[in-house]
Image: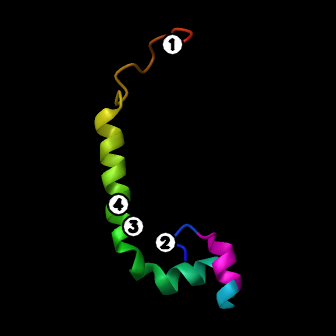
Amino acid sequence: MVSSGANVKAVQRQLGHASASMTLDVYADLFDDDLDRLMGGVQALVASADCGQNVGKPVEPGV
């Protein structure tokens, strides 16, 4: 459910767990593909970003 976008707190209640951290701890091993997908997204974002080259430079309005 979490991997599909469900709120962790809602899943916690549905499963009757005492805490959201318990829910995530119990099922954390199911999210390996999510981590791979996340890293791919982060890498794409970094590759397309400025990577801090303009830090400290004034921002032009409307840019």
Q: Which amino acid lies under the numbered mark 4 shown in the image of this protein?
A: Arg
Query: Which of the colour schemes (rainbow, by chain, secondary structure, one colour) is used?
Result: rainbow
For the stretch drawn in magenta, what is the main secondary structure?
helix
- Give the image quarter of residue 30: bottom left
Percent position of residue 17, x then y = 66, 88
- Give the image quarter of residue 62: top right
Magenta span has 43?
no
Q: Where residue 9 is drawn, which disc sits there? A: none
Residue shown at 51% from the left, 82% from the top: 25
Q: Where residue 37 is drawn, which disc sits there? A: 4
Q: Which amino acid lies under the numbered mark 3 shown in the image of this protein?
A: Asp
Q: Considering the numbered disc 1 on the image, is that residue within a helix, a strand or a loop? A: loop
Label 3 crowd bin: few (<14), some (14–19), many (20+), radius 10 Å:
few
Instruction: Report the residue marked by disc 2.
Output: 3
Q: Quadrant of the N terminus?
A: bottom right
Are the residues tagged 3 and 2 within 8 Å (C-beta)? Answer: yes
Q: Considering the numbered disc 4 on the image, is that residue within a helix, a strand or a loop? A: helix
Q: Is residue 49 left or right of residue 20?
A: left
Q: Where residue 59 is drawn, which disc sits there? A: 1
Q: Considering the numbered disc 2 on the image, is that residue within a helix, a strand or a loop? A: loop
Q: Is residue 9 left or right of residue 48?
A: right
Q: Nearer the viewer, mark 1 or mark 2?
A: 2
Label 2 crowd bin: few (<14), some (14–19), many (20+), radius 10 Å:
few
Are the residues tagged 3 and 4 within 8 Å (C-beta)? Answer: yes
Instruction: Report the residue marked by disc 3.
Output: 34
What is the magenta range? 6-13
Residue 47, compared with residue 26, is above or below; it is: above
